[in-house]
Structures are given as structure tokens and as C-alpha cells.
């Protein structure tokens, strides 16, 4: 029925035709800055309160404005989602899948345009932006195929004289709360997963990247989703976020973001309010303090290159970013020297010129990263970077490397979420394993080694949801590397994995006796 699933390919931007087409997309997007409404029950809603989205590389540039929801609008959005639920939940899995495949086709046709929005709104260079759009397309295609699978009855043993059947049913209307760092991919994956399973949603985008989310809603409309299946509700987390999380009619909460906010939501979502007939399902995918271990048998050049790519891609603003580099004593100096040299050579500048390291997302994030760097100066040795870069008023920070960081140091434990790496010295491999596991998180991690026994130990003992051997630790592919962490990195929902839709479904078993 559908073609076999394959990941969306990336462009080669060293081909000038692709780079020229991308620049043309940026110019086109820039000529279309506009205002976006909420979308409730398929209808545009203006609230008279506006949220401005700004270009982090040039904060004087307003990329667009979106209407801001209040609690009344949040209530109407949840009502609209419930109104759409009975019909959507009964659309068969194949027809739901067709909606998703159509949505993927629309996103694919708009690939450079949507990437260009990300370049301007989130400061992602061409490769990073296109990878995000490709991942969004992958989520639609992958979950479409799962929508078909989950509509099949589940295997049960036969029993004489009875017809026994178990099948999965969607659970209801929920809310989707994504972060800004993969403003399309994560928002789309967290939305279309539950929707593919037959649920309906209210999407509250991150306040730093509402325009790309609003552009996605145009694709939702073009794909022909019935009104109310996907509602769009930009608004402050503290106002509409808390309201929807607490609401007795919210059936599930699908959150990705920081540990602080995730813990708050998990606690609130566990409270049963008056009139609430269920326990809310609540998935919290949270932060990381991801480490790469390099031992004395590793290909040191490859390890240093992978460390730098994993640390500074999208300015280190990935939950999977390599933020702790653990080097065994024998190779500490050599690897560190390579990492420092590679880091010093990284150009910093505008995403729209496709420079390697771009602005961080907001002024407050820049401020918070710089203050963490200042704290690092007091507890470790600053080797590269450490300063803001003054360019068009943009929120730039030099790629930064600290050496001689103690395993318990603040900068070895706290998620900084910016271009900052802590390098730690391990006495030997045993000590490296201990340091690796010595944080409250457990999202991604990796090992560079050529020793089979150590690779096997890492497979068993590195306590992370996504482990990478002899490669960079970022860039999980939908359907290939299901993604989600352990411990305080979250509920291990495994986005892009084979069980994702089941998180938003429950199993009904029917036994009919013939006589
Ligand atoms: P935040 O936790 O600040 O925000 C995430 C989302 O929660 C935003 O939409 C935000 O809205 C919303 N929010 C804030 N307060 C509330 C509230 N009280 N109730 C409901 N919603 C609320 O995270 P960031 O957006 O800064 O994202 C970065 C974080 O995300 C990092 O910690 C990173 O590691 C993590 N992350 C984890 C991933 C994973 O798979 N484990 C993947 C990607 C990122 P608003 O923007 O309006 O404040």
C-alpha cells in the first residue's frame, strides 16, 4: 500500500545549485513575514495579544507575530479536540496513515522553505535546518506505517467456544508541549504520533519558535485533517501550559523540554482533579549531560572530530549534544590538543550564510550560558572561547572548551544547553565508566575504542537510552535509532521507535462466548 519506509535524504550544500536554491528560499521567506492566528477547531482565532518571534542572529528583525492564547482560548481548544475525537478515533488506521503520508508530501515539497524559516527563526545553518525538516517528514512517514500496524488485532491464544480478541484504541484529547530546539521535528513527531493513533491534540509551541509551528499548521490544513484534530495554541507555559496540564479533561500530556519544567508538569499531571475520570498519561522527555569516552586504543583523530561535531552542532543546543568529553589519562593531552585546535578553527557567524556555529536562541539563553561559563572559570581551566561574539546584536557565543574539569564540578553536572564542553580526565577505562554514569541524566553517550571487550562493557554498563560506538553521539534517525533517555532524561518514550503510538492507546479485550 505504501512504499517501504526510508529516511528522508539530505542535500549536498557544497553543490552551488542547492546552496543558491536555499539562499533564494531565505529571501522568499524574508519577504513574507506576517501575523498568525491560533487555530481552534480548524478556525483562525485572533486574540488581540501578540507574541513576537525574533531572529536570534539579528534581534531587530521580527520574523513574525502569533496570537497569544489565554485560558479561555485554551478551554475552547481542548473542547474542539474532544469534539473531533469521536469521529477521528473511528477513522480506520489506513485512512489516518494516508493523512500522514499526504502531510509528509507537503512538508517535502516545502523542504527548503521550511528549512529557511528555521534558519531565520532558530539560527540553524542549512544542514542543521534541513536535517530537522527531514526528521519531521520521517516522523510522518514512519508513524503512518505504524497507524496501519496498530489497527490490526493483537495475537491471543484461542479458547474453546469463545471468540477472543484484543485490539488497541486511542485514549482521547491531549496536549503537546515541545521545545524550541527542533522546532519542526520534535513538534511534528510529538503531534502526529498521538494523532496517527487516533487521538486529537492541542499543540502549545515553544515561545521562541512559534512561526515555524504556525507554518506547519498550514501544511496540516492542506493535508485535509478534519477540524479540531490538531489545534494550535501558542501561549505562555505558566498561563495556558499549567491550565491545560491541570485540566480534568486533558487525557494525556506529551512534553519534551528541560528537566525543571518536565518535573513540574509530571507532578501536576499526577493530581486527579474533580470530575477527572482517568489517570493522565504523561510523558516527559527531558535534558541530558551527554558524554563521550575516548580510550587509548581509539582512532584519536576520528574521536576528536566526532567530539567537536557532537558538541557544537547547532551551538550545542541539542539534548543529545556531547557536553562531557571523558579522556583516559594516556591520551588526554593528545585528544585535548586536537579538540582545542578543531574548536579554535570553527567559524562563528550568521546561519543564513551557512556558517558552522551560529547564534544561540535567545538573549536570556545567551545570558544563562555565559553565566555558567563564568562559574566554570572558577572551577576548571578555560582553554578556548568563553566570550560572547558581537555581530549584528545577535546572541553569539564562542565555542568553549574547559579542561581539567572534576567529575562533580557544576559544569560537569549541570546541563548548560549551549556551545560548552567539559573535558574530564579518567585514570583508566574503569574510572571512565564511573564518570560516564555519574550524572542524574542518561540520554545519549558514546565510546571511541578499538577493544572489543570495552565496547561490550559500554553496551552493558553505559546507562543511557542512546549509545553510539565509534561515531558522533547526535543525529538519531527516525525508525533507525529510536530516541529517548534514562533516569532524569525522561520517560523513555522512544520517539521514532516501534512502540511510540501505543503510548497513546489502550488495549481492549473482547471475549464472546458462542453458547
Ligand atoms: P523548556 O522546558 O523551557 O520548555 C519546553 C516547553 O515547555 C516549551 O513549550 C515551554 O513553553 C513549555 N513550558 C514552560 N513552562 C511550562 C508550564 N508551566 N506548563 C506547561 N508548559 C510549559 O525547554 P526548552 O524549550 O528550553 O528546551 C530545551 C530543553 O529540552 C533542554 O533541557 C533539552 O535537553 C530538552 N530536550 C530534550 C529532548 C529529549 O528527547 N529528551 C529533545 C530536545 C530537547 P514556553 O516556550 O512558552 O516557555
Image: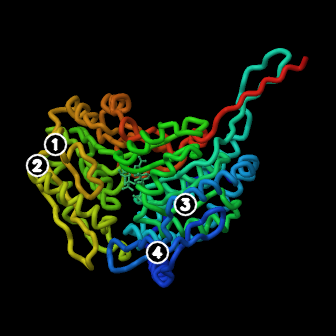
Q: Which residue is mark 3?
A: 72
Q: Residue at x 44, y 49 (%)?
A: 256
Q: Which residue is mark 2?
A: 380
Q: Which residue is mark 1?
A: 409
Q: Confirm or deny contact between disc 2 and disc 1 (CB under 8 A).
A: yes
Please state the horizontal and vertical placement of residue 286, each as a whole percent of the image: 39, 45
Under circle 3, the secondary element is: helix
Please state the horizontal and vertical placement of residue 482, each as a whole percent of the image: 49, 43
Q: Which callout, 3 or 2, points at the residue further toward the start of the chain?
A: 3
Q: Which callout, 3 or 4, points at the residue further toward the start of the chain?
A: 4
Point out the image quarter for the C terminus. Answer: top right
Q: Is the CB of the residue bearing disc 4 within 8 angstroms of ligand 1?
A: no
Query: Nearer the viewer's eye, disc 3 or disc 1?
Result: 3
Q: Residue at x 12, y 45 (%)?
A: 404
- Most distant residue in the top direction: 160
Query: Nearer the viewer's eye, disc 4 or disc 1?
Result: 4
In the image, is 198 to the left or to the right of 360? right
Q: CA distance from mark 2 to mark 4?
A: 42 Å
Q: CA distance from mark 4 to mark 1?
A: 41 Å
Q: Which callout, 2 or 1, points at the residue further toward the start of the chain?
A: 2
Q: Is the CB of the residue bearing disc 2 within 8 angstroms of ligand 1?
A: no
Query: Nearer the viewer's eye, disc 3 or disc 4?
Result: 3
User: How many residues crowd mark 4 within 10 Å: few (<14), some (14–19), many (20+)?
Assistant: many
Amino acid at each position: 500500500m505504501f512504499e517501504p519506509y526510508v529516511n528522508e535524504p539530505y542535500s549536498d550544500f557544497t553543490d552551488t545549485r542547492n546552496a543558491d536554491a536555499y539562499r533564494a528560499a531565505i529571501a522568499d521567506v524574508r519577504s513574507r513575514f506576517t501575523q498568525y492566528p491560533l487555530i481552534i477547531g480548524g478556525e483562525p482565532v485572533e486574540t488581540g495579544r501578540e507574541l513576537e518571534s525574533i531572529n536570534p542572529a539579528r534581534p531587530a528583525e521580527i520574523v513574525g507575530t502569533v496570537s497569544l492564547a489565554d485560558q479561555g482560548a485554551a478551554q475552547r481548544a481542548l473542547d474542539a479536540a474532544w469534539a473531533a475525537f469521536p469521529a477521528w478515533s473511528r477513522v480506520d488506521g489506513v485512512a489516518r496513515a494516508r493523512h500522514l503520508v499526504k502531510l509528509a508530501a507537503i512538508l517535502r515539497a516545502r523542504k527548503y522553505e521550511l528549512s529557511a524559516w528555521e534558519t531565520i527563526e532558530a539560527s540553524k545553518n542549512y544542514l542543521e535546518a534541513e536535517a530537522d525538516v527531514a526528521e519531521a517528514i520521517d516522523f510522518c512517514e514512519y508513524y503512518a506505517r505504524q497507524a496501519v500496524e496498530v489497527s490490526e488485532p493483537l495475537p491471543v491464544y484461542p479458547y474453546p467456544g469463545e471468540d477472543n480478541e484484543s485490539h488497541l484504541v486511542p485514549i482521547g484529547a491531549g496536549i503537546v508541549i515541545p521545545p524550541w530546539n527542533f522546532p519542526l521535528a520534535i513538534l511534528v513527531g510529538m503531534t502526529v504520533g498521538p494523532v496517527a493513533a487516533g487521538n486529537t491534540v492541542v499543540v502549545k509551541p515553544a515561545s521562541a519558535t512559534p512561526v515555524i509551528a504556525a507554518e506547519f499548521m498550514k501544511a496540516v490544513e492542506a493535508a485535509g485533517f478534519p477540524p479540531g484534530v490538531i489545534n494550535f495554541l501558542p501561549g505562555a507555559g505558566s498561563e495556558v501550559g499549567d491550565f491545560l496540564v491541570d485540566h480534568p479533561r486533558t487525557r494525556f500530556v506529551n512534553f519534551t523540554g528541560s528537566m525543571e519544567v518536565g518535573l513540574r508538569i509530571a507532578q501536576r499531571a499526577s493530581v486527579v482533579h474533580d470530575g477527572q475520570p482517568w489517570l493522565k498519561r504523561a510523558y516527559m522527555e527531558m535534558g541530558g549531560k551527554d558524554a563521550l569516552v575516548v580510550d587509548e586504543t581509539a582512532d584519536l583523530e576520528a574521536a576528536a572530530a566526532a567530539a567537536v561535531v557532537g558538541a557544537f552542532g547547532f551551538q550545542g543546543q541539542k539534548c543529545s549534544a556531547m557536553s562531557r568529553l571523558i579522556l583516559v589519562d594516556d591520551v588526554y593531552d593528545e585528544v585535548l590538543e586536537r579538540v582545542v585546535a578543531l574548536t579554535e578553527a570553527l567559524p562563528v557567524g550568521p546561519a543564513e550564510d551557512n556558517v558552522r556555529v551560529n547564534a544561540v536562541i535567545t538573549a536570556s539563553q545567551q545570558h544563562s550560558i555565559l553565566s555558567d561559563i563564568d562559574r566554570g572559570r572558577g572551577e576548571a581551566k578555560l582553554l578556548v572561547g568563553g566570550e560572547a561574539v558581537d555581530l549584528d546584536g545577535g546572541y553569539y557565543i564562542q565555542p568553549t572548551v574547559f579542561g581539567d574539569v572534576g567529575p562533580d564540578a557544576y559544569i560537569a553536572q549541570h546541563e548548560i544547553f549551549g556551545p560548552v564542553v567539559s573535558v574530564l580526565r579518567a585514570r583508566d577505562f574503569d574510572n571512565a565508566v564511573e564518570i560516564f554514569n555519574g550524572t542524574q541524566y542518561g540520554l545519549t553517550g558514546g565510546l571511541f575504542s578499538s577493544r572489543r571487550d570495552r565496547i561490550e562493557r559500554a553496551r552493558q554498563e553505559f546507562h543511557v537510552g542512546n549509545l553510539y560506538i565509534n561515531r558522533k553521539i547526535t543525529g538519531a534517525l527516525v525508525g533507525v535509532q529510536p530516541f529517548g533517555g534514562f533516569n532524569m532524561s525522561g520517560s523513555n518514550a522512544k520517539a521514532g521507535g516501534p512502540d511510540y503510538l501505543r503510548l497513546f492507546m489502550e488495549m481492549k479485550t473482547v471475549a464472546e462466548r458462542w453458547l
